Amino acid sequence: MENIKGVFFDFDGVLIDSLPSMKVAWTAVKESFHVRADFKDFKKIIGIPFISILKELKINERDFISIKKKYSEIASKNKKLIKLTPYVNELITWLRGEKIKVAIVTSKDFARTMELVEYFDLRVDAVVTPEQTFRGKPHPDPLF
């Protein structure tokens, strides 16, 4: 283990299951902004920054900020629907006990990521979100 200095984890779908919260938030966006894309369309491209998802779904750019705000608000109100993957805290505790740094690299924005890091009491050393990089995932920039 002494050669491993750090471990990077994706957040959604790895450390947490946030699909139920995402579905509720996307449904609210769809209804409020008369968006055509269903959740199944949204789900196919999860993993890239939210604004990139909106671009991929061909949503009118003038609505991006309002949609992001609505989505984040609804997702945050429904964080109780998000589940921590079993044994995540135990794994993080073990890694830190082995003097291995632990980081989260995610496409979720910083505010929502930190809200969930605190909500689940995740003891990580670093969090990298799209706001901190020139290009978000799937580009390697967040890892560097």
Image (cartoon, grey):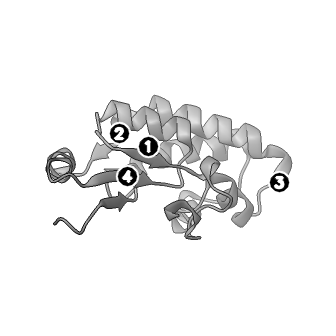
Type of amino acid at the residue the image marks with label 3: Asn
Residue in the image at 44% along x and 32% along y: 115
Residue in the image at 45% along x and 46% along y: 127
User: Residue 104: x percent and y percent?
Assistant: 40, 52
Task: Check contact, mark 2 vs mark 1: CB within 8 A.
Answer: yes
User: Residue 29: x percent and y percent?
Assistant: 64, 43
Q: Residues within 10 Å of mark 2 (few under 14, many from 20)?
A: some
Q: Is residue 33 left or right of residue 122?
A: right
Mark 4 and mark 3: Cα distance apart in space: 34 Å
Residue in the image at 29% along x and 61% along y: 5
Q: Which residue is mark 2?
A: 81
Mark 2 and mark 4: Cα distance apart in space: 23 Å
Q: Which residue is mark 4?
A: 103
User: Residue 51: x percent and y percent?
Assistant: 69, 53
Task: Check contact, mark 2 vs mark 3: CB within 8 A.
Answer: no
Type of amino acid at the residue the image marks with label 2: Leu
Task: Check contact, mark 4 vs mark 3: CB within 8 A.
Answer: no
Q: Which residue is mark 1?
A: 21
Look at the image and tell me whether residue 86 can be seen.
Answer: no
List the single residue furthest toward the right: 62
Q: Secondary structure at mark 1?
A: helix
Q: Which residue is mark 3?
A: 60
Q: Secondary structure at mark 4?
A: strand
Looking at marks 2 and 3 on the same chain, the residue that comes earlier in the sequence is marked by 3
